[in-house]
Image (cartoon, rainbow, N blue to C red):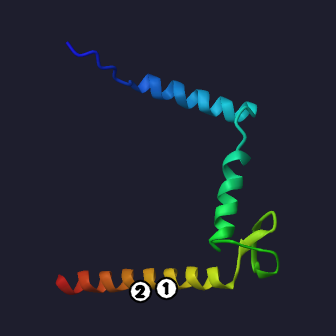
Amino acid sequence: MSNQTSVSEDDWITLLIILVLAFATGIVSVGMFLDPLRAWLLQYHVLEQGDAMVVPLFEGVGFGWGQLIVIAAIMLCSIALIVWLKRRAAARV
């Protein structure tokens, strides 16, 4: 007979409550997770800092012109793809 344990929904709810209380009481700092993420985003130029920043997001970090151009290009391509798919679907009917 195998001795496998299954995780029930009550176990997941209990773990979620413990996690929320740990964050609420300050045992686990959110900054512990955000500081390495911020450093990574700055290192790979996903966000800019200082004079290169055009659109500030938080604490001296934001988007530069390069990031804004990429975001605009992604939005434009997404809109063009949606329009093309809608016209293609309408042409099939």
User: Are there few (<14), some (14-19), or many (20+) residues within 10 Å of tag 2?
Assistant: few
Residue ID at (67%, 31%): 22
Q: Taking 61 as reference, is 82 above or below it?
A: below
SS of the residue under disc 1: helix
**Residue drawn at 63 percent across, 79 percent down:** 67
Residue at the image point whose x is 29% and y is 86% from the top: 87
Q: Amino acid at mark 2?
A: Ala
Q: Position of residue 62 (x, y in %)?
A: 73, 71
Q: Is residue 2 left or right of residue 67?
A: left
Near-viewer residue (91 or 66):
66
Q: Quadrant of residue 46?
A: bottom right
Residue 19 vertical placement versus 73 (above, below): above
The N terminus is located in which quarter?
Answer: top left
Which residue is at a point 60% across and 32% down the rendered structure image? 19
Q: Is residue 29 left or right of residue 7?
A: right
**Tag 1: residue type?**
Leu
Q: Is residue 58 left or right of residue 91?
A: right
Tag shown at residue 33: none
Q: Secondary structure at mark 2?
A: helix
Q: Say whether marks 2 and 1 touch (CB < 8 Å).
A: yes
Furthest toward the top, the residue is: 1
Residue tagged 1: 76
Q: Residues within 10 Å of mark 1 (few under 14, many from 20)?
A: few
Q: Position of residue 53 (x, y in %)?
A: 76, 78
Which percent across, then down, holds residue 14?
Answer: 52, 24
State which quadrant residue 39 falls in.
bottom right
Dot label at residue 80? 2
C-alpha distance separating marks 2 and 1: 6 Å
**Res 7 → quadrant:** top left
Position of the C terminus, as image quadrant, is bottom left
